[in-house]
Image (cartoon, rainbow, N blue to C red):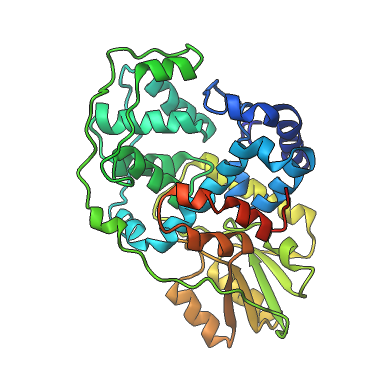
Amino acid sequence: MSTQFPTKTSEIKEKFDKFINKNLIDYSSKRNFDLGSPHTNVSTLSPYIGRRLMSETDILDIAFQKFKPNKIEKFVQEIFWRTYWRGWLELHPIIWNEYEKKIQDIEPPKKTGIKCFDYWTQELIETGYLHNHARMWYASIWIFTLKKDWIDGAIFFQKNLLDWCPAVNTLSWRWVAGLQTIGKNYIARADNIYKFTNYKFNPVNELNETASPLESQSSLNQQIINKEFEKISFSNLEDIGLIINKNDFSLDSLLKKDINFKICLFNCDNSLVDQSELIKNFENNLCEEIINNNTNISYVLSDEALINWITKFKIKNLIIPYETEGKCLLNRKSLLNKFTNNNVNVFFYLREWDRLAFPFAKKGFFPFKNKIPELLKRQGFTN
């Protein structure tokens, strides 16, 4: 595993502290530059945030101890971008359903002769990461220059990104293609790549810089569901079990001050895409680090082992991290029936960060962005 993405708790903290103390002050002016691995001008915290090994509130709490919110406004907005995408997809599930139908195994793209594109292909496979600007350029070249299906590109990222998120990945590819903001696509331009790779790449005359957006099924974007994100109280429950998994590795830390529970770490995948060995090793190493540092956590590797754990500890009320669109691990009919057969009540717990923000994600990011000060205040942050 690359030292760019450590899995030891102490090394992750050191990585975060280094960014906060040395690089955050320049984040706004330098964040759009792809300077190559290890990408110290951006936080590269997304593989941990996505699994909530570090939560958004944890990160902002530490950042605000050093800087006032208005001094690091762009960084705060980037934290909220992931929340916005997740909320938008949660309220437009048909988008994920249509994407999921078309998932198939694909091979890595062959060398194209476009140096920057081939470089990014290799970087992604070897490190599991690409700078956000490079992801936009890559998707644009894939779709408009190479004339490849955007869904295949999204699947390629899904197979290889350490920070893959179904909402962020799928909706970002749709945005580049001109399917998210209808009629507005993103065009990778040689002069932009030249500038923001600090003159490393200059694919002049190699890119299609006049492409039109893909034809859209604009009606899909209008199909918003009405969904209530209710706050759940556990104060009157007994015999509680709590599951942590790669959807939320730290839910136990959030809830332990309010309730008592038995806890297990569920490490079993249910993905339609066979993700890279790099991702599998990264997640397994994170799980091992959690288990090694917490003797009270049981380690569960299958549905059967989970039922045995429930039986052993006489669990009657089971708390599971909420599963947003595309992140289904335990919200499966076959497994839910087993819980019912064992007289277990199931609660999918949505963090307050998401519960408060998701209802504002019905439309574009800019209306959502206007709610950020209010959302920060409701999370307990003040200017």
Q: Quadrant of residue 304?
A: bottom right
Query: Which quadrant of the view contains residue 74?
Result: top right
Residue 233 or residue 7, whichever sits in front: 233
Q: Position of residue 88 (x, y in %)?
A: 43, 56
Residue drawn 48% across and 81% down?
337
Q: Is residue 233 above or below residue 279?
A: below
Residue 292 is situated, as x and y percent measured from the top left of the image, at 76, 53
**In this rendering, would 20 be left or right of 135?**
right
The answer to which of 62 and 37 lies nearer the viewer is: 62
Q: Position of residue 239 (x, y in %)?
A: 72, 83
- Is residue 125 visible in the rendered image? The answer is no
Residue 328 visible here = yes
Q: Residue at x 64, y 81 (%)?
A: 317
Which of these two is toward me, 127 or 27?
A: 27
User: Which residue does the image show at 74% across and 61% down from the upper left?
Assistant: 253
Image quarter in which the N terminus is found: top right
Residue 75 rendering spot, x and y as whole percentages: 61, 38
Q: Is residue 313 above or below residue 192?
A: below
